[in-house]
Image (cartoon, grey):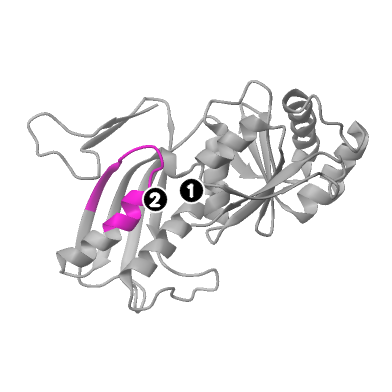
Amino acid sequence: MIERVVTAPGLFPPPSYSHVSVVEAGARLAFLAGTVPLDADGRLVGEGDPVLQAERTVANLRRQLAAVGSDPAHVVRTEVYVVSDDPAVLARVWQVVSASVPANGPHSSTLLGVSCLGYAGQLVEITATAVVPEVVLRRAGAADAGAAAEVYLRSYDAALPTVRRAHTDDEVREWFRHVVVPSLETWVAVSEGETVGVMVLDREELAQLYLAPGRQGRGLGDRFVELAKGQRPDGLELWTFQVNERAARFYERHGFVARERTDGARNEEREPDVRYVWRP
Protein backbone atom coordinates (compact mmCIF):
# COMPACT_ATOMS: atom_id res chain seq x y z
CA MET A 1 0.00 0.00 0.00
CA ILE A 2 1.21 3.53 -0.84
CA GLU A 3 0.38 6.46 1.42
CA ARG A 4 1.02 9.89 -0.07
CA VAL A 5 1.46 12.66 2.51
CA VAL A 6 0.87 15.65 0.28
CA THR A 7 1.67 18.26 2.91
CA ALA A 8 3.73 17.64 6.03
CA PRO A 9 2.56 19.78 8.99
CA GLY A 10 4.43 23.05 9.36
CA LEU A 11 5.81 23.05 5.79
CA PHE A 12 4.79 25.12 2.79
CA PRO A 13 2.20 23.20 0.71
CA PRO A 14 3.82 21.83 -2.45
CA PRO A 15 2.12 22.82 -5.72
CA SER A 16 1.98 19.43 -7.46
CA TYR A 17 4.05 16.89 -5.59
CA SER A 18 3.96 15.08 -2.25
CA HIS A 19 6.26 15.80 0.67
CA VAL A 20 6.36 12.14 1.68
CA SER A 21 5.42 8.74 0.24
CA VAL A 22 5.19 5.77 2.62
CA VAL A 23 5.25 2.18 1.37
CA GLU A 24 3.96 -0.65 3.54
CA ALA A 25 6.69 -3.08 4.66
CA GLY A 26 6.94 -6.21 2.55
CA ALA A 27 6.17 -4.55 -0.78
CA ARG A 28 8.44 -5.20 -3.76
CA LEU A 29 10.25 -2.09 -4.94
CA ALA A 30 11.79 -1.32 -8.32
CA PHE A 31 14.68 1.16 -8.52
CA LEU A 32 14.84 2.44 -12.09
CA ALA A 33 18.03 3.72 -13.67
CA GLY A 34 17.89 7.17 -15.21
CA THR A 35 15.38 7.22 -18.07
CA VAL A 36 16.56 9.19 -21.10
CA PRO A 37 14.93 10.61 -24.28
CA LEU A 38 16.32 8.09 -26.76
CA ASP A 39 14.37 5.98 -29.24
CA ALA A 40 14.81 2.22 -29.58
CA ASP A 41 17.75 2.75 -31.97
CA GLY A 42 19.56 5.10 -29.59
CA ARG A 43 18.67 8.31 -31.41
CA LEU A 44 17.95 11.43 -29.37
CA VAL A 45 14.30 12.53 -29.55
CA GLY A 46 13.42 16.23 -29.36
CA GLU A 47 16.81 17.79 -29.97
CA GLY A 48 16.96 21.25 -28.40
CA ASP A 49 13.43 20.99 -26.95
CA PRO A 50 13.23 20.08 -23.25
CA VAL A 51 9.45 19.57 -23.35
CA LEU A 52 9.62 17.07 -26.22
CA GLN A 53 12.50 15.32 -24.47
CA ALA A 54 10.45 15.19 -21.26
CA GLU A 55 7.53 13.61 -23.12
CA ARG A 56 9.78 10.96 -24.65
CA THR A 57 11.48 10.34 -21.31
CA VAL A 58 8.12 9.78 -19.62
CA ALA A 59 7.06 7.41 -22.43
CA ASN A 60 10.30 5.44 -21.93
CA LEU A 61 9.73 5.45 -18.17
CA ARG A 62 6.36 3.80 -18.73
CA ARG A 63 8.07 1.06 -20.72
CA GLN A 64 10.65 0.52 -17.97
CA LEU A 65 7.87 0.22 -15.42
CA ALA A 66 5.92 -2.20 -17.59
CA ALA A 67 8.99 -4.41 -17.96
CA VAL A 68 8.96 -5.09 -14.21
CA GLY A 69 5.17 -5.34 -13.87
CA SER A 70 4.59 -1.85 -12.49
CA ASP A 71 3.07 1.37 -13.85
CA PRO A 72 2.97 5.15 -13.24
CA ALA A 73 0.29 4.79 -10.56
CA HIS A 74 2.80 2.95 -8.39
CA VAL A 75 5.66 5.45 -8.65
CA VAL A 76 6.56 6.77 -5.19
CA ARG A 77 9.56 8.97 -6.00
CA THR A 78 11.31 10.60 -8.93
CA GLU A 79 14.31 12.81 -9.48
CA VAL A 80 13.99 15.00 -12.57
CA TYR A 81 17.16 16.46 -14.09
CA VAL A 82 16.97 19.31 -16.62
CA VAL A 83 19.90 20.97 -18.36
CA SER A 84 18.92 24.58 -17.63
CA ASP A 85 19.23 27.29 -15.01
CA ASP A 86 15.97 28.92 -16.10
CA PRO A 87 13.11 28.22 -13.63
CA ALA A 88 10.58 28.63 -16.46
CA VAL A 89 12.19 25.77 -18.42
CA LEU A 90 12.24 23.57 -15.33
CA ALA A 91 8.56 24.39 -14.73
CA ARG A 92 7.59 23.32 -18.26
CA VAL A 93 9.38 19.99 -17.85
CA TRP A 94 7.81 19.47 -14.44
CA GLN A 95 4.38 20.09 -15.94
CA VAL A 96 4.92 17.13 -18.29
CA VAL A 97 6.15 14.89 -15.47
CA SER A 98 3.48 15.80 -12.91
CA ALA A 99 0.71 15.27 -15.47
CA SER A 100 1.95 11.79 -16.31
CA VAL A 101 3.55 10.24 -13.22
CA PRO A 102 1.74 8.84 -11.42
CA ALA A 103 -1.90 8.49 -12.48
CA ASN A 104 -3.46 8.47 -9.00
CA GLY A 105 -1.96 11.43 -7.15
CA PRO A 106 1.18 13.46 -6.50
CA HIS A 107 4.39 11.60 -5.72
CA SER A 108 7.55 12.66 -3.90
CA SER A 109 10.00 14.29 -6.27
CA THR A 110 13.06 16.51 -6.64
CA LEU A 111 13.49 18.82 -9.64
CA LEU A 112 17.08 19.77 -10.48
CA GLY A 113 18.71 22.12 -12.96
CA VAL A 114 22.11 20.75 -14.01
CA SER A 115 24.91 21.74 -16.36
CA CYS A 116 24.98 18.58 -18.51
CA LEU A 117 23.78 14.98 -18.82
CA GLY A 118 25.31 11.84 -20.26
CA TYR A 119 24.29 11.89 -23.94
CA ALA A 120 25.17 14.62 -26.44
CA GLY A 121 22.21 16.99 -26.68
CA GLN A 122 20.36 15.37 -23.77
CA LEU A 123 18.34 17.87 -21.75
CA VAL A 124 16.16 15.66 -19.50
CA GLU A 125 16.60 12.54 -17.37
CA ILE A 126 14.31 10.94 -14.78
CA THR A 127 15.11 8.35 -12.11
CA ALA A 128 12.27 6.63 -10.28
CA THR A 129 11.38 4.29 -7.46
CA ALA A 130 8.15 2.32 -7.82
CA VAL A 131 6.18 -0.36 -6.02
CA VAL A 132 5.70 -3.59 -7.98
CA PRO A 133 2.07 -4.43 -7.16
CA GLU A 134 0.76 -7.82 -6.14
CA VAL A 135 -0.93 -8.21 -9.50
CA VAL A 136 1.85 -8.05 -12.09
CA LEU A 137 1.24 -7.02 -15.70
CA ARG A 138 3.70 -8.63 -18.11
CA ARG A 139 4.05 -9.73 -21.72
CA ALA A 140 2.51 -13.11 -22.39
CA GLY A 141 4.60 -16.05 -23.52
CA ALA A 142 3.55 -19.31 -25.17
CA ALA A 143 2.93 -20.90 -21.77
CA ASP A 144 0.33 -18.21 -20.97
CA ALA A 145 -1.92 -18.86 -23.95
CA GLY A 146 -4.17 -21.41 -22.25
CA ALA A 147 -4.78 -19.35 -19.12
CA ALA A 148 -5.35 -16.18 -21.16
CA ALA A 149 -7.96 -17.96 -23.26
CA GLU A 150 -9.77 -19.13 -20.12
CA VAL A 151 -9.93 -15.55 -18.80
CA TYR A 152 -11.39 -14.45 -22.15
CA LEU A 153 -14.01 -17.21 -22.10
CA ARG A 154 -15.08 -16.68 -18.48
CA SER A 155 -15.17 -12.91 -18.78
CA TYR A 156 -17.08 -12.94 -22.06
CA ASP A 157 -19.76 -15.22 -20.66
CA ALA A 158 -20.09 -13.17 -17.46
CA ALA A 159 -20.12 -9.71 -19.10
CA LEU A 160 -22.03 -10.51 -22.30
CA PRO A 161 -24.60 -13.20 -21.49
CA THR A 162 -26.94 -12.06 -24.29
CA VAL A 163 -24.27 -11.94 -27.00
CA ARG A 164 -23.61 -15.20 -28.81
CA ARG A 165 -20.01 -16.21 -29.36
CA ALA A 166 -19.10 -16.93 -32.96
CA HIS A 167 -16.60 -19.67 -31.99
CA THR A 168 -16.55 -22.66 -29.69
CA ASP A 169 -14.43 -22.76 -26.53
CA ASP A 170 -11.86 -24.99 -28.21
CA GLU A 171 -11.66 -22.70 -31.25
CA VAL A 172 -10.98 -19.75 -28.93
CA ARG A 173 -8.25 -21.72 -27.15
CA GLU A 174 -6.60 -22.58 -30.48
CA TRP A 175 -6.86 -18.95 -31.59
CA PHE A 176 -5.02 -17.77 -28.48
CA ARG A 177 -2.41 -20.51 -28.82
CA HIS A 178 -1.64 -20.12 -32.53
CA VAL A 179 -2.57 -16.51 -33.37
CA VAL A 180 -3.06 -14.14 -30.43
CA VAL A 181 -0.05 -14.85 -28.23
CA PRO A 182 2.51 -15.61 -31.00
CA SER A 183 1.47 -12.83 -33.40
CA LEU A 184 -0.02 -9.96 -31.38
CA GLU A 185 1.21 -7.87 -28.44
CA THR A 186 -0.44 -9.77 -25.60
CA TRP A 187 -0.25 -8.85 -21.92
CA VAL A 188 -1.45 -10.82 -18.92
CA ALA A 189 -2.19 -9.87 -15.31
CA VAL A 190 -0.90 -12.48 -12.88
CA SER A 191 -1.63 -12.70 -9.14
CA GLU A 192 0.07 -15.41 -7.07
CA GLY A 193 0.53 -17.55 -10.17
CA GLU A 194 -3.05 -17.14 -11.41
CA THR A 195 -3.84 -15.28 -14.64
CA VAL A 196 -6.61 -12.79 -13.85
CA GLY A 197 -6.60 -10.52 -16.91
CA VAL A 198 -5.56 -10.31 -20.55
CA MET A 199 -5.05 -7.42 -22.96
CA VAL A 200 -4.19 -7.61 -26.66
CA LEU A 201 -2.84 -4.76 -28.80
CA ASP A 202 -2.95 -5.07 -32.59
CA ARG A 203 -1.12 -2.10 -34.11
CA GLU A 204 -3.09 0.93 -32.81
CA GLU A 205 -6.13 -1.14 -31.82
CA LEU A 206 -6.85 -2.23 -28.26
CA ALA A 207 -8.22 -5.49 -29.60
CA GLN A 208 -9.04 -7.35 -26.38
CA LEU A 209 -9.32 -6.44 -22.69
CA TYR A 210 -10.85 -9.01 -20.37
CA LEU A 211 -10.68 -9.46 -16.61
CA ALA A 212 -11.54 -12.59 -14.67
CA PRO A 213 -14.97 -12.38 -13.00
CA GLY A 214 -14.60 -10.73 -9.61
CA ARG A 215 -11.61 -8.62 -10.68
CA GLN A 216 -13.64 -5.72 -12.10
CA GLY A 217 -13.82 -2.49 -10.16
CA ARG A 218 -10.49 -3.02 -8.38
CA GLY A 219 -8.25 -0.89 -10.58
CA LEU A 220 -6.88 -3.66 -12.79
CA GLY A 221 -8.67 -2.43 -15.91
CA ASP A 222 -7.34 1.08 -15.22
CA ARG A 223 -3.81 -0.29 -15.11
CA PHE A 224 -4.27 -2.13 -18.40
CA VAL A 225 -5.56 1.00 -20.15
CA GLU A 226 -2.72 3.08 -18.72
CA LEU A 227 -0.30 0.44 -20.03
CA ALA A 228 -1.95 0.48 -23.45
CA LYS A 229 -1.64 4.26 -23.66
CA GLY A 230 2.02 4.00 -22.71
CA GLN A 231 2.62 1.41 -25.43
CA ARG A 232 0.68 3.44 -28.01
CA PRO A 233 1.29 7.09 -27.04
CA ASP A 234 0.03 8.38 -30.41
CA GLY A 235 -3.47 7.01 -29.87
CA LEU A 236 -5.71 3.96 -29.62
CA GLU A 237 -8.93 2.65 -31.13
CA LEU A 238 -11.23 -0.15 -30.01
CA TRP A 239 -14.60 -1.74 -30.67
CA THR A 240 -17.09 -2.81 -28.02
CA PHE A 241 -20.68 -4.03 -28.20
CA GLN A 242 -23.34 -1.40 -27.65
CA VAL A 243 -25.07 -3.62 -25.12
CA ASN A 244 -21.95 -3.54 -22.92
CA GLU A 245 -22.81 -0.25 -21.19
CA ARG A 246 -20.34 -0.91 -18.38
CA ALA A 247 -17.47 -1.08 -20.87
CA ALA A 248 -18.68 2.11 -22.56
CA ARG A 249 -18.64 4.00 -19.25
CA PHE A 250 -15.19 2.59 -18.45
CA TYR A 251 -13.60 3.66 -21.73
CA GLU A 252 -15.28 7.07 -21.70
CA ARG A 253 -13.87 7.65 -18.22
CA HIS A 254 -10.43 7.03 -19.71
CA GLY A 255 -10.89 9.63 -22.43
CA PHE A 256 -12.12 7.44 -25.29
CA VAL A 257 -14.71 9.06 -27.55
CA ALA A 258 -17.38 7.18 -29.54
CA ARG A 259 -16.82 7.84 -33.25
CA GLU A 260 -18.88 5.21 -35.07
CA ARG A 261 -21.86 2.96 -34.36
CA THR A 262 -22.91 0.03 -36.55
CA ASP A 263 -25.72 -2.50 -36.73
CA GLY A 264 -23.21 -5.35 -36.27
CA ALA A 265 -23.35 -6.58 -39.86
CA ARG A 266 -19.53 -6.47 -40.10
CA ASN A 267 -18.72 -8.46 -36.93
CA GLU A 268 -18.94 -12.21 -36.50
CA GLU A 269 -21.45 -11.99 -33.68
CA ARG A 270 -23.84 -9.81 -35.72
CA GLU A 271 -24.21 -7.61 -32.65
CA PRO A 272 -24.50 -3.77 -32.81
CA ASP A 273 -21.16 -2.26 -31.83
CA VAL A 274 -19.38 1.06 -31.34
CA ARG A 275 -15.90 2.25 -32.25
CA TYR A 276 -14.04 4.31 -29.61
CA VAL A 277 -10.97 6.48 -30.23
CA TRP A 278 -8.44 7.95 -27.82
CA ARG A 279 -5.96 10.61 -28.87
CA PRO A 280 -3.49 12.31 -26.49
Query: Residue 181 location in percent, x, y?
Result: 77, 48
Decide if residue 181 is in sight here: yes
Q: Residues within 10 Å of mark 2 (few under 14, many from 20)?
A: some
Q: Residue at x 40, y 74 (%)?
A: 46
Q: Quick check: 28 left or right of 181? A: left
Q: CA distance from mark 2 to mark 1?
A: 13 Å
Query: Residue 237 location in percent, x, y?
Result: 64, 53
Say which quadrant the N terminus sits in: top left
Of the image marks 2 and 1, the number of the one nearer the N terminus: 1
Q: Quick check: 90 left or right of 146? A: left
The residue type indicated by label 1 comes to: Leu
Query: Residue 97 location in percent, x, y?
Result: 34, 54
Q: Nearer the viewer, residue 214 or 121?
A: 214
Q: Residue at x 56, y 33 (%)?
A: 220
The quarter holding residue 13 reads: top left
Q: Residue at x 79, y 26 (%)?
A: 157
The quarter holding residue 56 reads: bottom left
SS type, badge 1: helix
Are circles 2 and 1 on residues that touch, CB within 8 Å?
no
Q: Quick check: 139 left or right of 183? A: left
Magenta-tinted stretch? 94-110
| 191 is higher (above) or lower (below) than 171 | above
Q: Which residue is mark 2?
A: 100
Q: Which residue is mark 1?
A: 65
| 119 is higher (above) or lower (below) than 16 | below
The quarter holding residue 171 reads: top right
Q: Quick check: 212 left or right of 131? A: right
Q: Nearer the viewer, residue 141 or 165?
A: 165
SS type, badge 2: helix
The residue type indicated by label 2 comes to: Ser
Q: Residue furthest top?
A: 214
